[in-house]
Image (cartoon, rainbow, N blue to C red):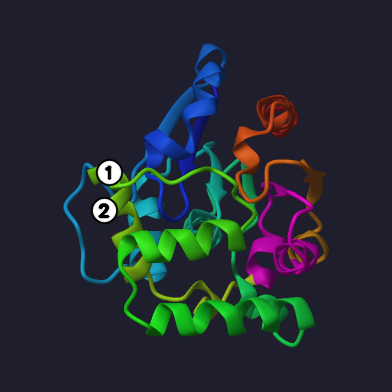
Amino acid sequence: MERIVFVHGSVGNAELAWAAQHPLEERFDCIFLTRSGYPPRPPLDRIDFEEQADEVAAELRAGDHLVGHSYGGVVSLLAAARRPVLRSLTVSEPPAFGLARGDPAVETFLSRLGPMRAGNPTPAEYLAFFMPLVGSALPLPDPLPPVLEQGARAALAERPPEEAVVPLDALAEASFSKLVISGAHGPAFDAVCDVLERGLDAERAVLPGFGHSVARHPEYNAVLGEFVDRASR
């Protein structure tokens, strides 16, 4: 049975982020990693994608299929370069904005996000700003449940992902298959995915209608499963 390792993004832990992927367990050995700082793991004052890439790389086995979403996609790109023993790498909308600096949409996105990060917002204030920014229309409960409050605090503790230096050349030279997934909701994320598609000679899937939460798209599991099957041959 092929093994898929899932790495979640910001705010939601593995349980929340990959809730729709449990049906894949009928066909694959699915490992849903919760990144350090996210519940039920203890909170952290600072979360660094470099350190978390080391943590994920240590979990990888030869022949794994690595799947990362959002901030977890940045972590996964770095982890795959550290330990290129994979059969495949899939990333959905990683905010590796350093790859597309100068793009007007990227610069606009960062100019909006930067002041919020610097303004010491409460978890509720941050989510009320961030969720619409990434195309989420999900209503926020008041008060926030503890798992979501810790997730928001973890997101605020994360090192800005645009600081990541993604080794495109090394990843492109790696023999494993690559897939980039985008949601057609935000030109800043599209710009990064365009760079990755070209730079990694990756397959590309576009799953619109769910904002940044592309893993909730009803076709996501089929797209991922078919890609893993192809990469396993």
**Residue at the spot of label 2:** 150
Q: Residue at x 80, y 64 (%)?
A: 194
Is the residue marked by circle 2 packed among few (<14), some (14-19), or many (20+) residues within 10 Å?
many
Outermost residue on the bottom side: it is 102
Whole-percent x, y for residue 209 in the image: 75, 41
Asked whether disc 2 touches disc 1, contact meaning CB atoms under 8 Å apart, the reply is yes
Q: Report the magenta residues as a range.
A: 168-195
Q: Looking at the rendering, which quadrant does residue 224 occupy? A: top right
Rendered image: mark on residue 147: 1
- Front residue of 158/57: it is 158
Q: Residue at x 54, y 36 (%)?
A: 63
Is the residue marked by circle 1 packed among few (<14), some (14-19), or many (20+) residues within 10 Å?
some
Whole-percent x, y for residue 67 in the image: 56, 43
Q: Residue at x 60, y 70 (%)?
A: 96
**Which SS class for mark 1?**
helix
- Front residue of 9/176: it is 9
Above or below, comparing residue 85 to residue 157 in the picture? above
**Which SS class for mark 2?**
helix
The amino acid beneath tag 2 is Gln
State how many labels appear.
2
